Image: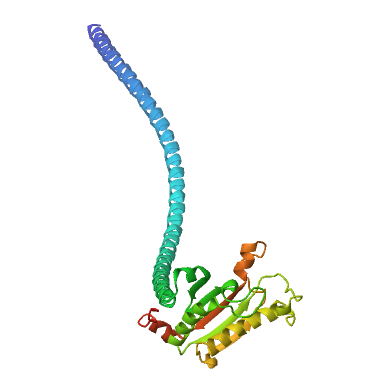
Amino acid sequence: MKKNLLIISLVAGCFMVSSCVSKKDLENCQLENKELTNKYQETQGKLSDANSELAASKVRVTSLEEQLAQTKSAYESLQSSLDKSLTASNQTTVNISKLVDQINESNQYIRHLVEVKSKSDSLNLILTNNLTRSLSKEELKEVDVQVLKGVVYISLADNMLYKSGSYEINDRAAETLSKIAKIIKDYKDYDVLIEGNTDNVPVNTSSAAMKNIRNNWDLSCLRASSVVQALINQYGVDPKRLTAGGRGEYNPVTSNDTEVGKQRNRRTQIIITPKLDQFMDLIDKAPESAE
């Protein structure tokens, strides 16, 4: 009986001890489970945040990739434009260089023309002075001397050469023609053309002096012929050097609408045509002044 009670007591004690141990372990397990649950939930939260951040990062990466593609395309476009610009720039540089060369050549040519024109003007002035130095101031009012491209034009008004309404030389013309004859003889190797010119007024054939003249052609030729014969017969100019010609009313220097214009057109021109080397000699040689 005592033995059974002892056994029962031991079993009960063991059971009590076992109950106490299991409850403590259970509490510990429950606490640990709670901590693990909290950590799990915390981890789940972090994982969710990480996933959200990853998704956002993927969106940013996609956006950046698109921007990179656009930037690359823009770069390639700019590079292409730059290449074209450089090519065009190189071509433009070449064209500018050619243009500069052309401008320089043009400037040199212009300077040359200016120099030639200046020399030509100077020679013409010298020649004009040489040819007119023997003429008086009064004579120069009715005698126009010009030098154009090496050709000398001495233009005399009809009223200082001819009788009114005639082709005959008047007494007043003698002194002027003598000086012009001296100029012609001083430059003996030059050819001389005597050219008559009239205005557009028809010839008055009713007068005795003009009865054998048909028109202004005849009048201009006869006047030129009169000057030629005067130079030959009175002043000893070599006839081989002289040519007489008439241009009638068809070589006016101005309009015939006014009396002044008609007067200017009624003229006789003495045209002296030197050769180039002879023209250059005129700088060094000049006719002596009349006493």
For image coordinates 58% across by 87% down, the residue present is 229
Front residue (pair 180, 80):
180
- Does residue 168 appear in the picture of this structure? yes
Front residue (pair 53, 137):
137
| Residue 114 in picture, x, y percent from top left | 41, 69
Specify the color scheme: rainbow
For image coordinates 26% across by 15% down, the residue present is 21
| Residue 177 in picture, x, y percent from top left | 51, 80
Is residue 109 shown left or right of residue 234?
A: left
For image coordinates 45% across by 61% down, the residue present is 88
| Residue 12 in picture, x, y percent from top left | 27, 9
Q: Quadrant of the N terminus?
A: top left
Above or below for 59 versus 229: above
Front residue (pair 181, 55):
181
Q: Quadrant of residue 280?
A: bottom left
| Residue 58 in picture, x, y percent from top left | 43, 38
For image coordinates 33% across by 17% down, the residue present is 30
- Does residue 152 appear in the picture of this structure? no
Question: In this figure, what is the number of numbered marks?
Answer: 0
Q: Quadrant of the C terminus?
A: bottom left
